[in-house]
Structure formats: C-alpha cells, structure tokens
Amino acid sequence: MSALAKLPVTILTGFLGVGKTTLLNRILHERHGERIAVIENEFGEAGIDNDILLTPGSEQIVEMNNGCICCTVRGDLVRILGELAQRRASGSLQFDRVIIETTGLADPAPVAQTFFMDGDIARSYALDAIVTIVDARHGDAQLNANHEAQEQVGFADRLLLSKTDLVDAETAARLKDRLTRMNPRAPISAVDFGRTPIAALLDIGGFSLDAILEIEPDFLDDVAHEHDDTVQSFVFTSDTPLDQGRLQAFFREAMDSHAEDLMRYKGIAAFPGFDHRVVFQGVHMIMGSDIGRRWAVDEPRRSTLVFIGRNLPKDQWLERLAACRAD
Amino acid sequence: MTGTETCANGAVSPLLSERLPIADDPALKFAEPWEAKAFAIIVKLAEDGVIAWPDWVACFSREVAKATAAEARGETPKSYYAQWLDAAETILVEKGVTSREQLLARRFAAGSVGSGHTMA
C-alpha cells in the first residue's frame, strides 16, 4: 500500500457481551502480514470490557461549527486518528488498517460521521464498513429492551450472528427475519469465531457508492411480523424514471424534518435521459452520489431506494416518492 | 515561485508565474474553498500534461465570452471562479476525464443535502 492510499477503517459494533473482543482477538491473531491498529472503546483509554464501558458520558461528542445537530463527530476519535496518521507518516508506527471497536452502548453515527466531516481524517482514512454483531441467544431481548441495540443494527453494512450454536435453527431464523426487516441492505451471516474466515469482515465497501444494492425479494412482501421495532426500513421502487429535481426536493424536506431519524439510505436512480444509473447513499444528512454503470439495452430502468431509520413516516414518504416519477 | 515556470507542454503558464491574475487583482482572491480547489485542479492537470495550456486558455476565453454575452442580455452575472468552473467542466468533459452525466450525478447529493454535507 502506498503512503498516499487511504487506510481502510472498519467500525465493529454490537451490544455488550456479543463477542466483539473475541472476534477482534481472532482477527489480530489470524491476519498475518498485515498490521492493524485497533482503537478500542473509550478511544485511547487503557483496558477493554471493564466498567468504563458503561459510561457513555466519557465520549467526546463534538458538534461541527455549522450547527447541524446530526453532523456530530467524535472529538476523541479525531484526536487519536490524527495521532496515528502522524506517527505512521513519521515512520514510528506501521499499520495498514484500522478497526474501531465501539462500546456496546455507543451511537455509531458520530463515529462514522467523523470520517466524512473532518477534512484531515477524510484525507487519511476511508471508512469501509460498519459491522454489527448480534447475539443469537440474547439478541431478541436486547433489541426489545435497548434502542442502542436497534440502532447498531440499523447502521450496519453487515450483520454477524454470534452464538448460533446456543439456539435452535428456528430461533436463529426468526431473529434473522427481524434483523432483515430492520435493515434489509446488510447481509446477515452466522459466525463461529473459531472458524469463520476473517476476510468476510474486511473490505466490504459498505460506503462505496458502486456497491451492489441487493434486497431480499421476500422483504418486499408485506407479511405480518411480530415485532414493532423503532428502527425500521422500507424500500421504494419505480420502473418509471424519477425526476431529479423533485427527488432532490424530497431529500431536502426529508432532511429538514427527519435528518436525525434517518440513519442510513441507499439508492439507485434512473433519471430521464440518463444512460447510466445514478447511485447515492448517506448517513443522516451526509450524502454522496456518483454515476453508476450503464443501463443495459433490454434492462428495465428500475429505481430502488432503501431507507433505514427510527419511526420514519413510511406511508407519507412512499407517496411523496411516487410523486417524484417523471411525467 | 518564479516567473519562468512552465507547463508540461512548454507553454508559459500565467498561473504559475508572478503574473498570476490572482496575485495582481484583489478581486480575484478566493472567497470560497471550492474556488481554490477548482483553480488548483486545472493548474495541476496542466502541470501533469493532461491539459495543454493553450487549450485551457481558449476554453476559458470561450466561457468568459459566453458569460459576458449572457450578462449583456440581462442574465445574472457570473463570478470569475464560476466562469472558471464552467470552463473547467467543459475541458474535463472534452478530454474525457469526466462526463456531463457524471457531473450531474455527483451533484445529486449536493442538491439533496447541501454542498457542506457531501461525502468526499
């Protein structure tokens, strides 16, 4: 890797006791030939998995000076990432990758936003993905009792189900179904920390705009489900191209009213007269867009937009999105 | 910086010399970060030989003439760097570095959340 290439960063999250530390130890032992800087918990404080984990007040949440409440970053993370980059540049420290393990109670958004809002950090590091571990045995109860657990699922680019050996197949399948409804864009895989290939956790490209958007076809069937989760998702599709200006107006209004509740979104859009897909995605109010691949000649120009958030006004937004169809 | 620096194609670049318009005219100081970025991108691409300096001068002149004519018709005047940006986009599309579709696609996010909120 050249000194100028951006260092990939993985955010590893999950509720208390799901096995984050076990997985990290495994990564550190297995990933031979690659140096990984691990930033743990309180970002620079010594010790992991101790009582300090339960003190979310020690996080340094910083509001950017534009006054936008959803553009908060982690001041402690900015500091430590800056120090790491400096030491790497001076040759006193060598590493090719960063893994950030957040506390079981941390909100992943300010951690992720740090990589987009702070200029120096964005120049040195590239956020690869948010990986969330869910405990197959206790996941249901944790999701019922803790909104933090739900948010970690909502923000994820990939979901790992740990301890599946402790539950029967039906229980694991039910939990998977619940997770898919909360976050249909994150693939779910069962992990056995002793055996699962670590490569499946790294270089996921969760924030790359050209990443494939795959939604389970079953997700689109509106079947009854047993949980009424705060974090929910919905998908909008259209075979009629969308009007770019109206879609932008939709997002501006959606951000005005729901930027804090809109956790992740991703879309492929067909615009009239565009031979290529337009791809976009975002975290809260931070959004990126680019040109995607060319539509094939006989391919339906289907726009697909996925929204994940807390108590989003699904019906209202679907109606407004339908009105974005070009005449 | 000396007055004798040249682009890769050998043409003397007024932008790389003491005769820089930016240095002469206080009205051309960068007011916004994007202006410095647009300026630097063109200078860098000229240095690297992606753009031949005379091509840039011709392209920028055409953009300036267009903006001047538009202003004469009563349209909103464009700032120096807005004209620079228009010319930069035109030449980068002509050289195949980007396309009009890509430029529009990348603007989608800025038009949806505001330019201060786009992912780099």
Image (tube, rainbow, N blue to C red):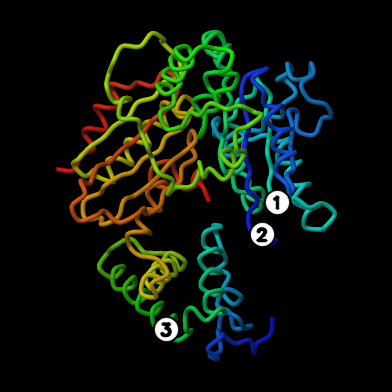
Say which element carries label 3: helix
CA–CA distance in space, label 2 to label 1: 7 Å
Check the image and report above or below for A19 versus B84: above
Q: Give the CA separation, mark 3 to mark 2.
A: 36 Å
Secondary structure at numbered mark 2: loop
The amino acid beneath tag 3 is Asp
Residue at coordinates 38% horizontally, 59% vertically from top-left?
Answer: B103
Percent x, y of residue A326: 18, 43
| Left or right: residue A148 compared with residue A312 | right
Q: Which residue: 21% across, 44% down?
A: A241
Count up the numbered dots: 3
In-image side of A316 versus A25 (left or right): left
Q: Is residue B4 above or below residue A12?
A: below
In the picture of the structure, the residue carrying the numbered disc 2 is A1
**Amino acid carrying mark 1 in the image:** Asp
Q: On what subunit does the disc labeled 3 rest?
A: B
Is the residue marked by circle 2 packed among few (<14), some (14-19), or many (20+) residues within 10 Å? few
Dots 2, 1 in contact, CB < 8 A: yes
Whole-percent x and y of residue A55? 74, 17
Horizontal and vertical percent position of residue A165: 58, 17
Select label 3 or label 2 by which is in front.
2
Q: Which residue is mark 3?
A: B55
Are there few (<14), some (14-19), or many (20+) residues within 10 Å of tag 1?
A: some
Q: Which quadrant would the N terminus of chain B be assigned to in this image?
A: bottom right
- Tell if the residue under mark 2 belongs to the same chain as the one under mark 1: yes
Residue beneath disc 1 = A96
